[in-house]
Amino acid sequence: MKLILLGAPGAGKGTVAKLLTEMDGSVQISTGDILRGAVQAGTELGKQAQAYMNAGDLVPDELIMGIMGKRLQEPDCEKGFLLDGFPRTIPQAEALKVMLDELGIKLDMAVNIDVPRDVILDRLTTRRTCSNSDCQAIYNVKSNPPKVEGVCDKCGSPVIQREDETEEAISHRLETYNEKTAPLIGFYENEGLCVTVKATSSEDVINAIKARLAA
Ligand code: AMP
């Protein structure tokens, strides 16, 4: 399947993407994971992106399109892909459209995961992430803690609170979402690709996507 996952930070895009990869081998592509990996590795990209990310600002479109232009042409994308956190601005969506047309790739849909703001705020402040950039498993101190506190179940690395998940950075990320990313819902409605799912459980989101793919 070839999907875009839209939704505010904390809507569950990453969790849903990880579950969908188990269905048909489609690969999850999270620009946030790629950028955090680059910051941790200290690459040029990471150095350029870090300050924006820590402040809860978007990284410039040129940097993101540079990453995605290469990533979408890698062989593992042939089975399908789940775009998690990309596109995030109208210029990124327009550039993606051109890129996919050139590659002859057709999207199945853009899923807008619509979760109430109070749920989002609660999730983001209680979310914890594996610090290993090759793992980045997601936990929640209330609903899904690691078996051993502070240690990733999957790879044993420390589980941490992301630097952009302080209350200040979270509220800035949500403002940025409303201003820059929410307009993508209209963009993909115009393309006839947008499906809005109002659900707080990832199983419900997955079932809605499956039903839509089968229709
Ligand atoms: P995420 O893990 O998707 O919440 O992304 C974490 C941070 O990475 C965001 O707050 C942005 O600073 C940056 N980022 C991730 N994806 C993008 C994107 N498509 N465009 C611009 N910045 C991005």
Image (cartoon, grey):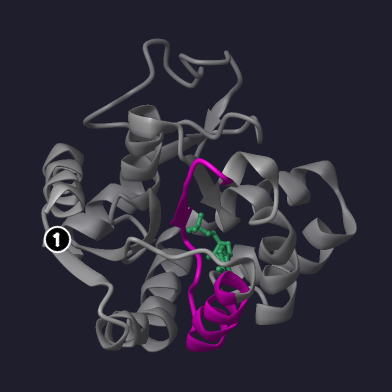
* 191, 172: nearer the viewer: 191
Q: Amino acid at mark 1?
A: Val
Say few, some or many: other residues with alpha carbon within 10 Å of mark 1 (under 14 / 14 to 19 / 20 or more): some
Of the 4 image quadrants, the one containing the C terminus is bottom left
Does the magenta portion include 11? no
Asked whether residue 81 appears in the rendered view, the answer is yes
Q: Position of residue 193 (x, y in %)?
A: 28, 73
Residue 96 figure quarter:
bottom right
The furthest residue to the right: 44
Residue underneath mark 1: 197
Up/down of 123 relative to 148, above or below: below
Q: Which residue shows up at 20% across the image and 43% down it?
A: 206
Q: Which residue shows up at 44% across the image and 71% down it?
A: 173
Q: Which residue shows up at 25% across the image and 80% down it?
A: 192
Q: Which residue shows up at 28% across the image and 87% down it?
A: 186
Range shown magenta? 78-101
